[in-house]
Image: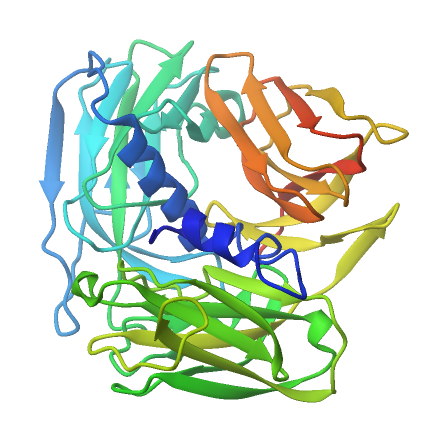
Amino acid sequence: MTTTTDLREALASATDFEDAGAIGRTQSVHARIARIRRRRAATGVVAAAVVAAVTVTAIAHPSRHSSVDPATTVVGVSVPKTVVVPPATGFSYRVTSVQTGAVGAASLRATTPAGDDDHVVAMVASGLGDGTATLVDESNTGLDRILGAQTGGAGMGAFVPALGGMTLRIKTSGVTPDVQLALVTYTLVQPLSVGVRDDSNQTAFPEQVGGQTLQTARFARPGQAELTVRTHGDPRSLFFSVYCVVPSSAGDVWMNAKVNGRSSMWGQCDTTPRADASGDGFTVGLPGPANGSVHLWMSHGKNGAPVAIEGAVLGIGVYDVGEKSTTDGIAADRVIESQGRLWQLSGRVWKDGEPAAWRHTFDATQEPRVLRLATGTGGGTTRFEVKGDDGTVAQSLTFGGGAMTGGDVLLLPGTTYTVTVRSERPAKSQILVYGEAATG
């Protein structure tokens, strides 16, 4: 049990914690990558689509002493050499490959460079006319869309987090005979230069995650089994982001936490390193001293004695949760990070009363949106289903019992979506709607 899903299931059983692992970090870049990883493992072999031949321009992976100078024009569209994802507050990525389809080819299948490096990808298209280009993964889940009518028939899409060796597809509709498609891959620039970093500068807690600001963070020194950081403010206004990665040979290793000496949390450590240490965490529901502490340690077995693990990386970051908006007793983050972008709360949808099942249709718009589901207490297991009218897969998610917020389902522009919420028992629930936040 080493995936983010497994960790959150373990966190959800923690005592004295509210919404453990559900608020705040389903919007992180890592969380998006983790969902892609689990989906790829589950789907297995996917039938190959019929696409045109692809030209691959490989660029050597940049080291700390070298630089790359790729062409900045792809299929007639200007593209940046380096990007920061999410804008202004994230990590730097540099172009490492460009895969280009033939002129007139209405689809393109491309694969990111193999290996464990973190990537973001962006589709580029020209000759769209008033048509569309849509980026999907192997399970046909929509990741991004370019509307030709908005971009003058050519443009570059959003930067989407991706894994090494991941196969993606660009498909089009209503385009001109001169359409040409490309997928540009950017690779994380190492060593990292932002945030609070571990000794290797390969992992960091970012200073900002959505609307949340880092208050303090620390990594354990090599050979240490535990660490403690001091906190400031009401613990209920903090997000405790935890990071524990151990070698796969380490066996059954758990991380455990106590806030102000109580309210234990536990979850199994991961075995896959990542640059963004802020991917998992928890909030607390009990008050505490304005000047407190959080203690984190590794053990063999849940809540066991501290044990040092050779090669382990253990860290904790404490974030101020940021500004909230509350309607009918349900609080929501005003700004979130999801899909490698920043989003701002723009609305809510709910049904009067506390129905066990309800449905809502989101009409097509010209801009992307992100949906989250917020549930109250008493509803038990809740199903959150989102389906598009164009055959592009959205998501179907299951929430455990209790008050929780999560989901981060992307709605592509130009598609009408039907959302269904089903709970075991009547309970309060809201769909939170986010639009892209303006970034300077």
Q: Quadrant of residue 174?
A: top left
The front one of 74 and 386 is 386
Residue at 14% across, 25% down: 54
Coloration mode? rainbow
Decide if residue 154 is on the left or right side of residue 213.
Answer: left
Decide if residue 31 is on the left or right side of residue 25.
Answer: left
Q: Quadrant of residue 132?
A: top left
Residue 240: image x %, image y %? 56, 70
Residue at 70% across, 29% down: 424
Q: How many labels sit on residues? A: 0
Q: Is 319 located above or below residue 378 in the figure?
A: below
Q: Is 190 located above or below residue 73 in the figure?
A: below
Name the quadrant of the C terminus. bottom right
Q: Is residue 139 visible?
A: yes
Residue 254: image x %, image y %? 38, 67
Residue at 26% across, 64% down: 189
Residue 3: image x %, image y %? 36, 50
Q: Is residue 89 visible?
A: no
Decide if residue 99 is on the left or right side of residue 23.
Answer: left
Q: Is 136 located above or below residue 13 in the figure?
A: above
The front one of 273 and 297 is 297
